[in-house]
Each structure stands twice: as structure tokens, then as C-alpha cells.
Amino acid sequence: MKENLVFWMKSLSNYIISLVFIFISCSDIEKPSYSGLMRTFESSFESLDDFNVFYIVPLGDYDSNQELSSEEVKNGHYAHKAWILKARDVNNDGLIYLPHRAYPTIQLQKSTNGIFRTPCLVSIWVYLDMTMKFRPKGSINDWFSFLTLSPDQSTNWNRVVCINTRPDGYIRLVHVPNQGEQIRIFQADSINNPDKSLQFKHKTWTRLDVYIDFAAKYGYAKVWQNGKLVSHALVSGGNGGLAQIHCGLYASAAIPSGVIYNDNLIIREVENEEEVLAFINSAIQ
């Protein structure tokens, strides 16, 4: 009886926490306020001018660094390079958890006509060279995040959806359908992908395409890796707009080293998923 009561109290506590997340997530979310032609944001990371009106993580912060580099490039002369300097002193223990960060943001609320309407397609080429580990019980396992998408225009980024990978080698949607949750409709993993063909390959250029719909009702997201679906989930907590994105280095604090290159970022407003599939198919062929 006592065990049942404890279980019920924990379940109620988790439910209340989820409601708080939802309330916080929705409180700062504004609807797009324009009509007109579909818009696109593009950067091949040839110049910092593409990001000079947006926030960029200061160099050296979070034991990480970044630059435009010609070392590893998909197209053009430069790609965005970000790397880890050392494992963070504050990592897996205690109340403070500060991951590695080295990235530019794309703050669409600062662009002409404000935030983008969703659904949107976010496409990017990535080259990751990083060793990730499962950590001892009670610690946070290593993870790396390729993209963070938010409908929130504030500096708090209260509601986000992330596209992550971890030591098992599969890319997955995170914070779905609600902030702090990991519930997906489909997820590529070792059970449904025994030949491991959908595992993310390090030290090679990989195309990621993300369909994101931050609709107030019935929102959802999908991720394709080199044209193959790897993750699909419902998304709540939005109000029809994509406000901010960051891409580059965002990784768990305990990782001691590693590098990520980004190239050819495109954010498109789209009509529907059918249009997205046409874009992906034409790019992969």
C-alpha cells in the first residue's frame, strides 16, 4: 500500500512538472504576424555577416571555441567549425549542468517580417568527429545536439525541440512532444535497424533535413538523414511560428574533445510535408 502511494505521488509530481513546462513554454510564444510569399534564410558560412545581427556565443566560453574554417568544407571556401577545448569542471554532478556551447544563432524575429511561419524545412550538412560514451549510473550519458529549434522569441528559449545523437549512434528528436519528454512515433534504433544502416557516421558529410510544425494543435516534427527517415514525433507548445535556431557545437559537459563542421544551412517556409519530400529527393539525387 505504501509503495502504491509513493508511486502515485511521484506520478502526480511528474504530471504537475509537465504542466509547468507546458505553461512556461506557451507563455512567451507569439503567432507569426505577416502574410505573403514564403521566405528562406540561407548561409553557406562564407562570412560572419550572415549572423552579425544575431547572438553568437563568445569565443572560448563553455570550454569550447568556433571559427569559419577551410579545413573541412562541403561547398564553397569555408564551413563553420566548432570544437571542445576540454571537459567541463561543472559537468555531471550537482544542481548545475553547463554543456559545451559554441555556435551562432539565427534569430528570425530580428529579420524582415519577424519569425517564420511553420511548417518549415531546416536543412544542413554536418561533419562530426566526436567520441561519446555511456557514463556510470547516476551520471548523464554523453550527447551531441546538431540543431535546436524554438518558437520562443525571448532570450530564455523556453520551448525547444532538439535534434541529437548519443553513444548508440542514432539521431533522434528530443523534448517531444513536450519540453523534457522523449516520446516518439518512430525512432530508428538497433531493434528496427539491425544492419545499422541508419546509424550516424562520423567523419563524413551527412545531410540532415528537419520538418518542424509548431502549430498550436497537431504540431509534429520529422528528421531525415541522407534522405532516410530516422525520427518522428508530435510537438506541442508552439503557436505557428519558428523564431530561433542554433547550430554548431552543443554537447554534454563531460566530453573532453571533438569537432563539428556545419555547411549549407537553409531554412524554408513550406506548405506541407509533400513539398518537403520533393526538396529532399531533389537534393539527394
Image (tube, rainbow, N blue to C red):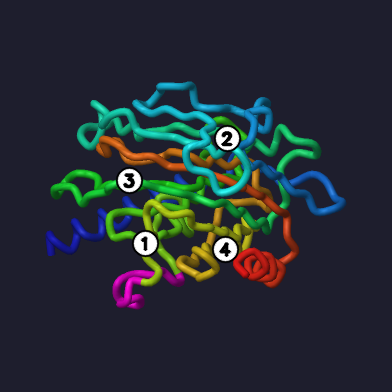
Label 4 belongs to which residue?
A: 220
Residue appearing at x 70%, y 53% in the figure: 268
| Mark found first going from the N terminus, 1 or 4 | 1
Residue 125 x, y percent position in the rendering: 54, 52
The answer to whether the residues at label 1 and label 4 have Cβ atoms under 8 Å apart is no
Q: Looking at numbered disc 3 in the image, what kind of residue is underneath it?
A: Met
> In this rendering, which labeled residue sits more in front, label 4 or label 3?
3
Label 1 belongs to which residue?
A: 170
Label 2 belongs to which residue?
A: 105
Mark 1–mark 4 distance (CA, rounded to whole Å): 19 Å
Q: Looking at numbered disc 2 in the image, what kind of residue is underneath it?
A: Thr
Q: Looking at numbered disc 1 in the image, what kind of residue is underneath it?
A: Tyr
> In this rendering, which labeled residue sits more in front, label 1 or label 4?
1
> With 94 as the anchor, is 43 left or right in this view?
right
Mark 2–mark 1 distance (CA, rounded to whole Å): 24 Å
How many discs appear?
4
> In this rendering, which labeled residue sits more in front, label 4 or label 2?
2
Q: Nearer the viewer, residue 85 or 233?
A: 85
Q: Which residues are magenta?
A: 185-196
